[in-house]
Amino acid sequence: MTLQDLFPQEAGLVVTDFALTPDLLALALKTTCPSSQCPDCGQRTDRIHSHYWRVLADLPWQARRVLLRIELRKFRCMNAACPRQIFCVRLL
């Protein structure tokens, strides 16, 4: 099994780095989706506002702690009537 099997391209995530120590498995990922849909008005946009990091802890794997550090995109809604001008891409 490869990292690509764990995070297929359809998931919109790509592994950018990883570290494996006797007590830790750490993966750095980033989103690859070129656009996203506004959760309020539903308009699709490709205007990236910024990026931010989210850190998730998962269940242990072979007695190692698992940390996922994911770089997510914030998008700008281009609908002037929408109350939400900036939103984060959703993880599924």
Image: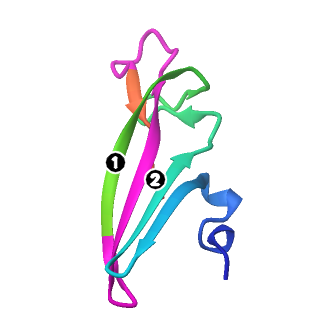
68 is higher (above) or lower (below) than 47: below
Mark 2 and mark 1 in contact (Cβ < 8 Å)?
Answer: yes
Rendered residue at 47%/32% (across/down): 38
Q: Residues within 10 Å of mark 1 (few under 14, many from 20)?
A: few
Question: Residue 51, located in which quarter of the rendered image?
Answer: top left
Rendered residue at 33%/89% (across/down): 63
Looking at this view, name the residue that lies furthest to the bottom: 62
Alpha carbons under labels 1 and 2: distance apart: 11 Å
Q: Secondary structure at mark 2?
A: loop
Instruction: Please provide percent x and percent y for residue 84.
Output: 35, 22
Instruction: Please provide percent x and percent y for residue 9.
Output: 69, 58
Magenta region's main secondary structure? strand
Would residue 35 appear left or right of 40 to someone viewing this image? right
Q: Which residue is mark 1?
A: 54
Q: Secondary structure at mark 1?
A: strand
Q: Which residue is mark 2?
A: 91
Q: Amino acid at mark 1?
A: Arg
